[in-house]
Amino acid sequence: MPWIKVYTVGEAKGILKREYDKALKRAGRIWHIVSIMSQNPRAMKSSMDFYSTIMFGRSPLSRGQREMLAVVVSAENECIY
């Protein structure tokens, strides 16, 4: 079974701390998909910026439609969203 070091909120500094703080404000917790990127805070920031653009940026799709697509794709991939 794979094992990846995940940095906790208490260990976070710099970019990682800022990204964790934003995640806590946004969701009230740190989801595993976010914490797994803790070894590379710049990649985490880029990933979260990309997610924000896709889910909240200008689009012909409504916010509900975007969420529905995310749920359907996750279900098809047998992944929790």
Image: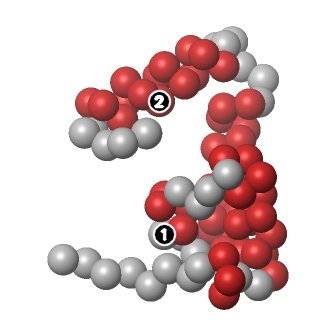
> Residue 66's spot in the image, x, y percent?
57, 22
Amino acid type shown at disc 1? Ile
Q: Which residue is mark 2?
A: 70
- Quadrant location of residue 57? top right
- Quadrant location of residue 38? bottom right
Count of labels in the image: 2
Residue positioned most to the front = 28
Q: CA distance from mark 2 to mark 1?
A: 19 Å
Front-most of 56 and 22?
Answer: 22
- Residue 31 visible in this rendered orientation of the protein: yes
10 left or right, relative to 57: left
- Quadrant containing the C terminus is top left
Asked if the residues shown at circle 2 and circle 1 are in contact, with their CB atoms under 8 angstroms apart, the answer is no
- Quadrant containing the N terminus is bottom left
In the depicted structure, whether residue 14 falls above or below residue 33 = below
Q: Residue at x 42, y 28 (%)?
A: 71
Q: Which residue is mark 1?
A: 36
Name the element at disc 1: loop
